[in-house]
Image: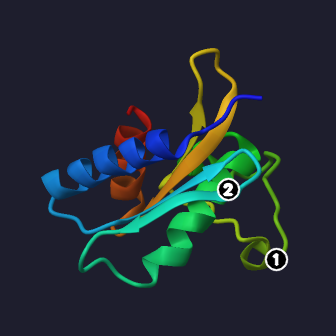
Amino acid sequence: MPELTLDHARRLVAQGEAAAREIGLKAVFAVLDTGANLVTFSRMDGAWLASNELAIAKARTAVMFQAPTEALNAPLQVGEPALHFDHIHHGGLLLIGGGVPLHDSDGTLIGAVGVSGGAPDQDAAIARAAAAA
């Protein structure tokens, strides 16, 4: 089974922190494996404490749905089927930008990274930058 190593997870966080600094943002990073277990977690100095749980929830959502969280928050359209989730908070899922699934070189899911600290589009861009590590 493919594995997300701690070393790889730390590289993801380092690259994400660099991307956050570039835009002047203080962010929180959570990297989870395929079982939604925490591999590493980092909060930049001065980042909001509320972002801790949000980063984990975004990573959990990305790994559970194997999709970027920003893709899961499409607006409702009349006549079209819509995703429906009851008790999202209790399941620890968050359907806004900032969570990105991680894949190995064969395209197999190995985990996800979640970012929180800015607007959803900022968090999504930082998560994508981190995932490129």
Q: Distance between the residues labelled 2 and 1?
A: 13 Å
Amino acid at the residue labelled 2: Thr
The residue shown at (69%, 25%) is 108
Residue at (39% x, 32% y) in the render: 132
Taking the image as shown, residue 103 lies to the left or right of residue 55, namely right
Residue, far top: 106
Q: Nearest the camera: 38 or 21?
A: 38
Residue at 51% from the left image edge and 58% from the top image edge? 40
Crowding at dot 1, Cα within 10 Å, few <14 / some 14-19 / many 20+, comes out as few
> Where is residue 10 shown, x and y percent of the image?
41, 48
The relative height of residue 74 versus residue 7 in the rendered view (above or below) is below
Residue, disc 1 = 87
Kind of element beneath mark 2: helix
Which x, y percent locates residue 32?
61, 53
Residue 116 falls in which quadrant of the image? bottom left
Q: Position of residue 8 (x, y in %)?
A: 46, 39
Give the label, 2 or 1, closer to the camera.
2
Instruction: Classify 46 as above or below 104.
Output: below
Which mark is first along the chain, 1 or 2? Answer: 2
Mark 2 lies on residue: 61
Is residue 74 visible in this depiction of the protein? Answer: no
